[in-house]
Image (spheres, helix red, strand yellow):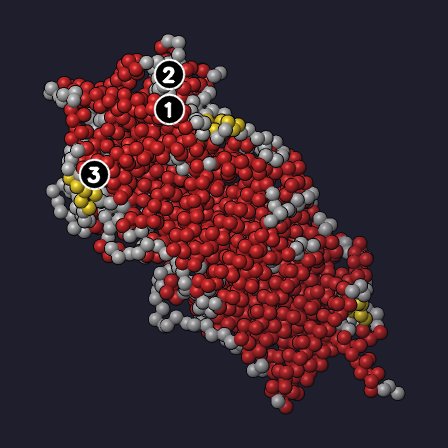
Amino acid sequence: MIYQSLGEWFDKIGNFSLTLLIVTVYGLLMGAFIERIIAKVQGRIGIPYKQPFINVLKNIFKRTAISHGIMFYLGPVFRIAGGIGTLAFIPVIFGSETFSNFSTAGDLFLVIYFMFFGQLGMALGAGESGHPYSAIGVARGLSQMTAYEVPFALAVVAIVLQYGTLSINDIVAAQQGGWQHWTMVTNWPATLAAMLAFLGMTGYSPFDIFLAPQEIPIGPPTEFHSAYLGLLQLNRALFGATKLILFMNLFFGGATGWPELMLKTWLIYMVAIVVGVAFPRYRVDQGIRFFFKLPTLIGIMSIIYVQMVLTA
Amino acid sequence: MITPALTDIAFTDVMLQPLGIFILALATAFLIPLFDRFYRGSATFIFLAALVGLILIAGLNLLAVIDGAPAIAIETAGIKPPFSINLRFGLFEGGFVLAINTVALLAAWHCLPTLRQHASALLLYLILVMGIDGTVMTRDLFNLFIFIEITSIAVYALIAMQRTGNALVAGFKYIMATSLASAFFLLGTIFIYYQTGTLNIDDIITHRALIQGPVGLIASLFLLTSLVIELKPYPANGWGLDVYETANTGIASLISVAVSAGVFFALYKLLPLLQDYLPSLTIIAGFTFLFSNIIALKQDNSRRLLGYSSIGQMALLTLALTLLIQQGAESQLPLIVGGLFINHLFAKAGLFWLAGIVTGSVNGRSIHQWSAIAGQPALIILFGLLISALIGLPPFPGFWAKWQLMMLLTDHQLFSWMVLILLGSLLEAGYLFRWFSYARQSAAQDTESEASKKPDPRKPAVVTAGLMQKAPIAIAGLLLLSTGYGMAQNLHLASPNLFLPLVAGFAMWLLDGIHGRLKDVPMLVAVALGGYLLTHDLDGINRMFSYLLLGGGLLMSFAAMYRNDDRRGFYPLLTVLLLSLAALLRAQDSLEFFFSWELMTLSSYLLVSLGRKAVKPALTYLLFSLGSAYFILAGFALAFAATGSQLLSDLGNSGASTDIIFVLLATGFLIKMGAFGVHIWLPGAYAESDDDFSAILSAVVSKAGVFGLLIIAAHLGVHAEIGLDPAYVLAWVGILTATFGALMAVFQEDIKRLLAYSSMGQLGYIVTGVALMSHLGWVAAMYMTVNHFLYKGILFLSVAGIILRSGERLMYRMGGLIKNMPFTFVFSMIAIIAMSGVPPLTGFGGKWMLFNALMDKGWYWITAMAFFSSAVAFLYMYRLLHTVFLGQRKLEHATLREAPITLLIPQMLLIIGIFVISANPKLLIDMLSVAIDPWLANTLVWDGYTLQGPYGYWNAPSIMLIVAGVWMVPLILLLLFSMTMKIQKVEQFNIVFAAERPHRPEQTHFAYHFFAHYDRAIGFVVRPRATAFWNGTVEWLHTLASALRIFYNGNGQTYALLIIMYLVAILFFNGGLAS
């Protein structure tokens, strides 16, 4: 066990709860902020900042609900457990014991694999709803995932090779001492490949067909409503922010305080938003092929770059 | 005065001498017409009595020789050679004569109904046997000519007695060809006598220096050509094939095995005179062996097929003989040539008799019609036994002989001959087992096969064979088994370990009459006891695998109880399979290893073929398995040549040939594991086996390949400390297997094929882990092996339950079964999570260690590929769970029940295994580490429960705890929220479906072609290229076979011309070689 005494565990749980709260609230707020930006681009005013909170609360306190079965019921539980767990294994603020979470239990590899936990559980829950659109959404989402996983994996291999460690904390530590030490600068091909993969990961246009947010209800959450949907909305905020924190840690020098974290993650997010509002949607097979071409090539380059330039 | 008693003794003395063979045969032949006049039955009686007498004479004399008596030399009438009959009866002669006489009696038994119609047939038969015996025993060149002539004429007469048009034509061609051969022989004899002044073979050999100049050349050329022609070399053998095809099967069997044996022995006797021709003879035999087997691929006529096989086998004998003589390895003759001879003698004769029974009942000789014996277990068993013997599978004499031959060939650097023999043997296995497959197909299945595109209006024929008809075949089979055992004892190999699986299997076969699932209990007991005996004193890697293979095998076999039908043959074969796996672990030297490996191959092939539509996939499985076995054999042979030792532990001393040995052995094991490119046997075999056997195949049997790979990696890769480059290739093969296995699994509709490809992919990671040749890599490989056993066992057993209840294998025809089979769903889900590598279950540990080890090794591209393939695996894993258990349930599936408890119990135990290892992988990793420590320095760093890798760290118990925690929190929250909500459980189809009202699950369940878009995006990479390649190879072989058949136009003149041309060709060819 990473902590010997029960007291240590409780301390850690308390600290993590604080992290969780901050990240979730931040995620919800940023969601509203992004919605407002997109609205401005499209010539609308957009939602107020309190809207995401209202949405979650409204859904959670709905008085009626239906259930398609036990796996359907557990789907959102798996989903948000995946979000919380992923955050739990990432050290959020560099140098802060309080906000290091449970990152001593596992490394970057654990985080990457644990991301699937929520997706798999959610997909199973959506499957039991019996709605064909859910299954179609899952099939598309999974297919796209295998594709953006390739440049992402290459980028991860490149930085693991560059820093000689899988420990997120050590990777962040290696980037301290100014922006010129960030992976973004030292290993720009890996960052580029990872950011391209990031476009697929966030699920904005041009890679949003598996959710198809504008159309008739489609995608994994189709059948979810009331408290189930509330949990899913919470998770979207939480998990989105968590992924941003991971990218920040791996490629953009991490953060030594909350303001730095918020600024950096917001900027990273903006990449996906700018691309999203500027480019139309890919068909799913086009999207898959996209990732196998240029991003994969850049990913391959990033490893060669590390081997030839950085560690030579 | 001579007292009667003394006369008696003198008489027996004479009669029991080898000479008695002639006296007895001739006397009986004279008496037969007399007795026939008197009473027909009595003629038959003295005929059979005489045949028994011949065996007795040969047997008693052989025993005397074996006991140390000098070889018996006989000169008749007190006159010196060349005017007397001059015989020798030594060890070789005795063995041949006894074997020939035995097979003659059995053949006579087989065709007695035909023979006894004419007294002259009985008479001719005896003369024929006597002629063959004489050919073997005589030491006089002219007598040899006479005996060969007697044999030929007797054969011709026996063929001609059939009086069918075909038989007469074939008989005519036969007598024409053999007359030509005899003429050559006589000419050769005359020239030899001219030069040496003697006809005694021993004298000629002593004075062989006198055979020289053009006359000498012509003399030996004629002698050689004559004997070679009699052995029916390609392409001058069309006449022989016609005889095999048309003659009565008893006579044909005798021509195939006994007449050929006589000629073969004559050749052996004269070889000292033909030293110059040895290389030519080797080449003739080699090509005849290869070409006969290629041509036979295209052959559908069972008799002609046997003809090709006979010619091939005799060529193999000749090849072995000439190679041994050239290498000066005469001491190996009894073992190799004797073994091959006995093997061919009984197996081929038995097959001819079987063909007689079948073609006697079925109107036609096509091998497609052999499905007529599908309902006859006894005939099927005999058929399989004889074919296995012919291929050289254990424990038959051919196995030992081929093994020894291979060792000898590599020891003398004769690699091309080794390749040729293995290739020919594989082809032979191909057509023989294809034939066997037809026999295994029941009539119902046959209607689906290509064979019956033209439907037969008649009712499918059923073979009826009485005990009397089966008896000779059964005796041949028993003789093969006992000779095989005897040879093993002579090699000092017959330790009970090797034969235990067979003995236990036989014991289970005796119990096979018990009805239903009860048979499983004695099987479990037998395997547990036998397995304990075999494996209790193992250590290291072998011990780990013994837990996995035997423990796992027992657990999976327990599940077999879910079926309560008779399952004839299933339990005995499973016993053999599991115990041969145990014996494999025990193997100390390469022969033991190979013996158990082949036994495993054979038993698993038969088990696969028990599946309902498994006959064709089983054949593919067998051929690839045999190919794999031959690679392994070649590897071991090379190792023997390099180290002079058969001990596995000496593999490491192979020096310069380490790399090639590693490549050969690894190729063998990779084929068995279904690696990329040679995987095409895998989906069929896994999918079409019985459902519970699929589980055993995937979860247990595939681990034998892993074991083999680890063992050779340990002995060769680590000990020899080279071989890194082959290891790197191996790693790529592994990761490509993982990627393509996963990609192909994604596009399957059949649930068992999906799991089959999944197995292929998951084994790919294990191969990569082994290839790492590092401590962490091996721990990862073995950890993944254990994990694969756990989750694949669960999944295949779950699927067995699903198929049992729903009767479906296509996933889109199912759906929503979570409501009916909640336990099966939960078990499958846990297994899928354990497979996917998602924390906190076992899969993550394997992936984590593998990635760390890969990064540590610097194999970054492979690391990235592994990432990709494990992401692809998610696709099929989700598809499996979704399309079967989730989504809309088919209306007709509403009443399905949960899988039977006998299937759930093993799954439950495996789930417990998954959770224990997930929560505390240190338990398993420590055990694995101890097993690997003797080979590679331990690099695992433990900090409490945290495993420190070269790059990262991993604390499994904590992760388990944290995940459980973060999972419980939202669950409790949702439960709290649920208290404020009124949750209504809704019926099927109650979904928000775009303003439509779905009413049929078929239209609502999204399942068919689930990843269509993925197919559109990158499906082109998994178009079945490997299948196309192997189909192309088969196609090409068939075309080659057609091309090689060009000489067989059925025209007697052509055949005669070919024989003459053959003589000329040998002359020129040998001239070329000599100069």
**Marks 3, 1 in one chain:** no
Asked whether B49 or A69 is in front, the reply is A69
Up-down relation of residue B150 to residue A130 (above or below): below
Graded by Cα atoms within 10 Å as few (under 14), some (14 to 19) or many (20 or more), the crowding at tag 2 reads few
Name the residue located 45 percent from the left edge and 15 percent from the top edge: A310
The kind of residue on which mark 2 rests is Ser
Q: Quadrant of residue B502?
A: bottom right
Q: Which numbered tag is attached to residue A96?
A: 2
Chain letter of the residue carrying label 1: A
**Marks 2, 1 in one chain:** yes
Up-down relation of residue B445 to residue A262 (above or below): below
Up-down relation of residue B913 to residue A93 (above or below): below
Q: Earlier in the sequence, mark 2 or mark 1?
A: 1
Q: Position of B22 compared to A203: left or right?
A: right
Q: Position of residue B885 (x, y in %)?
A: 29, 47
> How far is the residue under mark 2 from the one under mark 1?
12 Å
The kind of residue on which mark 3 rests is Met
Q: Position of residue A182 (x, y in %)?
A: 37, 14
Q: Which numbered tag is attached to residue A12?
A: 1
Quick check: marks 3 and 2 in contact, CB under 8 Å? no
Q: Count numbered badges in the picture.
A: 3
Mark 3 lies on residue: B979
Q: Position of B508 compared to B918: left or right?
A: right
Chain letter of the residue carrying label 2: A
The kind of residue on which mark 1 rests is Lys
> How far is the residue under mark 3 from the one under mark 2?
39 Å
> How far is the residue under mark 3 from the one under mark 1?
30 Å
Name the residue located 44 percent from the left edge and 32 percent from the top edge: B956
Q: Position of residue B156 (x, y in %)?
A: 60, 72
